[in-house]
Amino acid sequence: MPPQIPYIIGNEGCERFSFYGMRNILTVFLMTSLLLSVPEELRKGEAKEVFHTFVMGVYFFPLLGGWLADRFFGKYNTIFWLSLVYCAGHACLAAFESNITGFYTGLFLISLGSGGIKPLVSSFIGDQFDQSNRSLAQKVFDAFYWIINFGSFFASLLMPLILKHWGASIAFGIPGIFMAVATLIFWSGRGKYVHVKPTAHEDPNSFLKVVKTALGAGLPGKLAALAGILLAAWSISAYKELGLVVALCLALVLVMGFGGLGAWMQLSGAEARHGREAVQAVRTVLRLLVLFALVTPFWSLFDQKASTWILQANQMSKPGWFEASMMQALNPLLVMLLIPFNNLVLYPLLERSGLRITALRRMGAGIALSAVAFAVVALFQLWLDGGHAVTIIWQILPYAILTLGEVLVSATGLEFAYSQAPLAMKGVITSFWNLSVTIGNLWVLLANKSVKGEAVTAWVQTSGLSVTAFQMFFFSGFALLAALLFGLYARSYQMQDNYRRQ
């Protein structure tokens, strides 16, 4: 085991406490303090929109962090300097608890810092391994995911109580202290790490260069890319209706989707300039991005546990000392139990029974489980809408189902994204993996925008369901369809082994 791994794991544990410590009290703080000037009937929707916009930012900036690391500064330098930006964001939250502009500035800086380092820390772990010890990598990625949830568990349990009894400045200040400690731990290991030199800017056959050549190889690809640009322009022009962040993210998705389609149609036209091997690498990456796109519905459901599920928990009966957002602690606790259980008991048992547990099978099953979890909370919502008293203990069931799905999708996906990425694109590919979370939250915001329209609201009312229950059933069906498509597509996907050689 590489001796530098504990520095990265320790950094991640403190960083995750800092992130989840502020994230899991954000919705409650918005509802009870920062957005009190918003009419009460609109406040719930506004708080949910701010939360998911923030999460979108966190998982959008990995693209910037991955690009900077792969082309210019390397992973270590990018992680360190963006960690300082991250610390500044926490300081803003603590200092501007009653100032919307200052508070939102803090959220932006945390999005930039946390998002920028997010793909790099996991891929930096992968860089510490080579072909000789890569069998240890999945164990370390599982340990990495375990420590994420160790930090998240204590943050989720403690921070709602600190917010309630000590106020917002201390509740947002403590995560800032943990982020400063995380940065110090990471800096302390600087002389022990394996540093992989950024080479993407020197590569004449890089992903973007091959895609650019392919798009210029024929008219159909150009037309597909142009369609994406025109649709993106429409999205940006509709920013007043959609919201600026939603419009920009949707524009990015449209450009990437149609541009990728156009390049795929004409990849063979780039072989003369870049060679068969480089073109095949790009083809592999595009196939990988299709898989990532099919994972986005999972994140639509998963991140609503910190918004939709908390708002539902507020309607449930519970002890007077218990805060609804404390239910978030159940998720990391279950993750810490499930990761060793899966690796030591479940997976070996299934292997002995003749069922081969591949990374793609785990991920497909995880997406399906998220659909089941949302069907369960939708049934609880019907119960609540009917005027029945529902104890918060019932929420343990969907949390358990969703968390099992998370372990199958997210913990597996970290190592999967790294192992499939070409050597020069580790940061960017893990950025695309994180971008799938942004797109998942984009679907949530688009769904929220759609139900605000009179026609959609009237149609939902004819179903006899509340808007909340309808959305829950919708997202359950959305994820179930994605799981089916993921399973069908995964059958033809060819696995890669892109760990560095000694």
Image (spheres, rainbow, N blue to C red):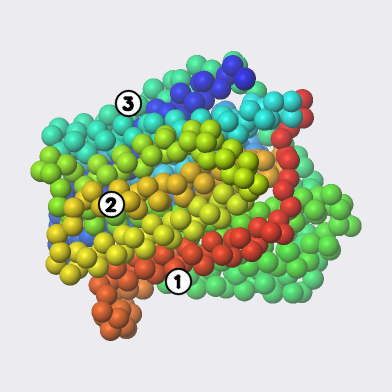
What residue is drawn where x is 59% and y is 16%? Answer: 3
* Mark toward the start of the polypeptide (1 vs 2): 1
Say which residue label 2 marks. 395
* Mark toward the start of the polypeptide (3 vs 2): 3
Against 37, is 349 above or below? Answer: above
Residues at discs 1 and 2 in contact (Cβ within 8 Å): no
Against 73, is 62 above or below? Answer: below
Observer-side mark, 1 or 2, equals: 2
Say which residue label 1 marks. 237
Residue 63 appears in the picture as rendered: no
Q: Position of residue 62 (x, y in %)?
A: 52, 45
Residue type pointed to by label 3: Ile
Q: Position of residue 409 (x, y in %)?
A: 52, 48
Q: Residue furthest right?
A: 272
Label 2: how many Cα within 10 Å (few below 14, some 14–19, many 20+)? many
Is 54 situated left or right of 410 in this image?
Answer: left
Report, in whole angstroms, how far the alpha carbon at label 3 lies from the one at label 1: 41 Å
Observer-side mark, 3 or 1, equals: 3
Residue type pointed to by label 2: Gln
Q: Quadrant of residue 301?
A: bottom left
Say which residue label 3 marks. 177
Q: Position of residue 433 (x, y in %)?
A: 56, 49
Report, in whole angstroms, how far the alpha carbon at label 1 lies from the one at label 2: 41 Å
Q: Position of residue 394 (x, y in %)?
A: 25, 52
